[in-house]
């Protein structure tokens, strides 16, 4: 079953996804089977209720983004704040093991096997989110524009001292 999904490019699953894939199992058998898959190393528990197939050939550099997308499925989420400003070269510090994500879902910080995911709630409207983000092929999450990432950073009251404002304004 995991190989079939791997061939479709999927290697991150929620517990609910897996219960649908193994729908013939009763609840107790499913839980025991899932624990066995983790124990045998066929799945890795990234965080509560999210699992990764570490042997997938389609495993890429976006595993942390894929885990974040799985954690907030059904919500609008996009990479912003320090993570996005770092990608744009506007801040000097590069958050190597931390992904900062704006979401219409719950806020929270989660330590995963692949790094820290920090969700910050936004009350922006869906049309506003869509206007101020872009999709990049192969990336699981939307990406904030430079302006939106800067605006989000100021709006949530984060440290703006690390921002190279000349770099930000040169682009604008």
Image (cartoon, grey):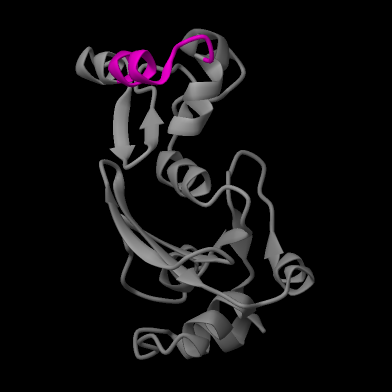
* Whether residue 14 is visible: no
Quarter of the view holding residue 28? top left
**Left or right: where 53 falls relative to 165:** left
Percent position of residue 33, x then y: 32, 13
Percent position of residue 42, x then y: 31, 15
Q: Depth check: 15 or 27 in front?
A: 27
Q: Which residues are magenta?
A: 23-34
Q: Depth check: 124 or 30 in front?
A: 30
Q: Residue furthest left?
A: 39
**Left or right: where 140 falls relative to 162:** right
Q: Indicate the quadrant containing the C terminus: top left, top right, bottom left or bottom right.
A: bottom right
Percent position of residue 72, x then y: 52, 52
**Left or right: where 61 falls relative to 31:** right
Quarter of the view holding residue 9? top right
Q: Residue at x 34, y 23 (%)?
A: 54
Task: Give the overall secondary structure of the magenta segment.
Answer: helix
Q: Depth check: 146 or 66 in front?
A: 66
Q: Residue at x 47, y 73 (%)?
A: 81
Residue 1 against residue 81 in the figure, above or below: above
Q: Depth check: 113 or 159 in front?
A: 113
**Left or right: where 109 falls relative to 82:** left
Percent position of residue 5, x then y: 56, 16
Q: Does residue 33 show up magenta in the picture?
A: yes
Total numbered labels: 0
Q: Does residue 83 show up magenta in the picture?
A: no
Residue 80 against residue 31 in the figure, above or below: below
* Whether residue 124 is visible: yes
Q: Residue at x 39, y 37 (%)?
A: 50
């Amino acid at each position: 079953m995991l190989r079939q999904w791997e061939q479709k490019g999927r290697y991150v699953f929620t517990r609910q996804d897996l219960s649908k894939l193994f729908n013939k199992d009763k609840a107790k058998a499913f839980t025991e089977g899932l624990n066995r898959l983790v124990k045998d190393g066929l799945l890795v528990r990234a965080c509560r209720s999210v699992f990764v197939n570490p042997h997938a050939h389609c495993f890429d550099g976006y595993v942390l983004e894929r885990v974040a997308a799985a954690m907030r499925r059904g919500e609008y989420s996009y990479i912003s704040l320090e993570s996005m400003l770092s990608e744009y070269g506007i801040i000097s510090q590069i958050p190597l093991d931390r992904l900062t994500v704006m979401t219409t879902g719950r806020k929270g910080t989660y330590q995963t096997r692949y790094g820290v995911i920090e969700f910050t709630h936004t009350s922006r409207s869906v049309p506003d989110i869509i206007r101020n983000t872009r999709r990049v092929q192969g990336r699981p999450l939307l990406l904030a524009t430079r302006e939106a990432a800067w605006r989000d950073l100021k709006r949530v009251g984060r440290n703006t001292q690390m921002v190279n404002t000349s770099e930000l304004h040169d682009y604008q």
